Image: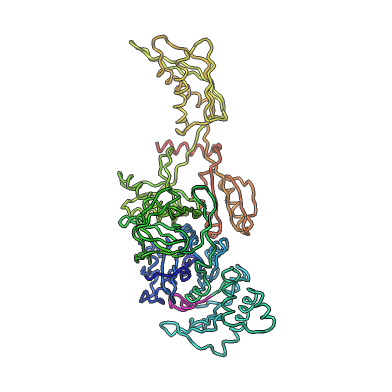
Amino acid sequence: MKQYASDKIRNVALLGHGGCGKTVLTEAMLYTTKLNNRIGKTEDGNTVSDFNKQEIERQLSISTSLIPIEWKNNKYNILDTPGYFDFVGEVNGALRIAGGAVIVIDASSGVEVGTEKAWKYLAKRKMPRIVYINKMDKDNVNYDKIINQLREHFGKAIAPFAIPLGTDNGLRGLVNVADMVAREYNGKECVDAPIKEEWLERINPIREMLIESVAESDEELMEKYFEGEPFTEEEIHKGLRKGVLAGDIVPVLVGSAINNIGTHTLLNMIEDYMPNPKDMAAYEGINPNNEEEIIREITPSEPFSSLIFKTVVDPYVGKISLMKVISGELNSDMEVYNPDKDEIEKIGHIFTLRGKKQIDVKKAIAGDVVAVSKLEYASTGDTLCDKNNPIKYKNIFFPQPTLFMAIEPKSKGDEEKIGTGLHKLMEEDPTFIVERNKETRQTLIGGQGDMHINVVTAKLKEKFGVDVTLADPKIPYRETIKGKADVQGKHKKQSGGHGQYGDVKIKFEPANEDFVFEEKIFGGSVPKNYIPAVEKGLRDCMESGVLAGFPVVNMRAILYDGSYHDVDSSEMAFKIAASLAFKKGMEQATPVLLEPIMKVEVVMPDDYMGDIMGDMNKRRGRILGMEPTGDGNQKVIAEAPQSELFKYAIDLRSMTQARGSFTMEFVRYDEVPMHLSDKIVQSYKEDK
């Protein structure tokens, strides 16, 4: 692939609801630019974007694919992102480095949840966008209805740039209203066609709307418009481009990716209206040495810097880091600084990816997206920069995992392979984490949902040859006492020779701290040198309570009396005596089970408020408050037991059609209701 100047590069992300046709649209682009001789289909498993085994089997995109294409002496880096919500981290990575985006809509479904989310992502980042209505060749598709739906959801920025030709008996083509060019499908491809007189009645009102948008983009043009003077083609383009780049105008195109209708128009629109790196705002960073703010323009004349937005880990090829060069140039054999790890990295092979195919690149300049293999320290979100001009860019935002499962190998001896595999998959996917719970002795994996977790386990088997089973995590319960007890613990073993003798009297009562030990011995009934052994014996016992063997908390022990033997007493004897007293004391002081309570913050549209609150009550939750978030959503703040929230990520998605999200953190332990406590204790005793 030849070298392109920065102003000839477009970095464009494809976004939309799962199944809307982003991947097939990418195929149509590859076909139109003569890089493929056919348009692949997701269901046939032969697309360039969805190339890994999991994507082919599931018939959906799991990770963002980089698809560079060339069009009219420009280079487009197309980023085909997943539509399924479990893989939102991939979307965040792509949007961090894209200049603009195309929101793809399934014409038969209209505005879906994924459409709304894509719009929100882009509006938050103030990114220019184009809406592409795909699958216009389907039966019973109503173009006007979709346009009205778009306006209803997203406002007056929605501007139809193209109208379909003949949707009743199949899509015949389209008219580009901005350029007044018709494209008709001849059974194989779209070709230019004359605009017929009978079409003008439909075209003119839409074109007039676009002309108004042009007038609003500039005061001089507004004046010209009111004076009734026609705009030149250059003025129309300039005004529309200004409006699109500002986000005031969102062009709407139509087409059918599988039939390659509308692809040519979309590719032209990307050149005309999507920003090249020179149109984009400079990147803000800090000097890692003194935290001072630095601004870097996206130009080759600045010192080198780049941001890694994605990592691919392959057990055979090694680690591939995909990055956007933000400033300067990247060459092979360069030594660059990684301020996130405070390490020097050596750049080896530079290439670009088209799906899984590697294409060699001599060098990369500002604005371009490339890949580098086998970096030693770098991970997703890291900055690479010139050693003598260091800069650190803000990391990419990745959501915290919301669903946790315990993972175990099916075969003994695979623990090490699991650890290695999971560590490598974490490098590839920052929205996935691995934790070892020392208390429950479980390895937990956390992801964005059940599909995410299933994909991780499937990759473990596919890439690292490890079969695993999944289970619900165990709850780290606690035990404590509600009452008081006064007990004696006596350990006496005197049957000839050196014996064992320890005798303690201890009062047990609830406390506000995990464990409080007090000593109130009078008259030396327990010698000073044995008192630490009594405390040690009690602390050891706190690790396992009398109900089901859970750690004990919030207990005060007061050693107030006892006895000893001059010859047979020892530290060990007093430790044993303390443990006997502990067991008796707990049993007599009304032991209870405690469970972890989590603070949950749920954000969702107002319509779902009643369902969310009702569901939280069923989970033994307590609503603490509600507040508007300022973007049309509501936040519900609640507390609920951890045991009731394991599958909340799945249930919330179901209740809100994936419009809701939540965060969760531990706050404290509370007593388990008696009817549940008995069941839990019985269950744990049976397990043991």
- Relative to 181, say whether 257 is above or below: above
409 sits left or right of 160 in the view: left
Q: Residue at x 67, y 81 (%)?
A: 224
Q: Nearer the viewer, residue 12 or 149?
A: 12
Q: Nearer the viewer, residue 433 or 542?
A: 433
Q: Residue 30: image x %, image y %?
A: 40, 73
Q: Residue 133: image x %, image y %?
A: 52, 73
- Residue extending furthest bottom? 197
Q: Is residue 581 visible?
A: yes
347 sits left or right of 539 in the view: left
- Relative to 678, say whether 431 is above or below: below
Q: Nearer the viewer, residue 151 or 2?
A: 2
Q: Residue at x 49, y 76 (%)?
A: 268
Q: Residue 350: image x %, image y %?
A: 36, 61
Q: Is residue 398 visible?
A: no
Q: Residue 231: image x %, image y %?
A: 61, 82
Range covered by the magenta-colored residues: 253-265
Q: Is residue 260 magenta?
A: yes
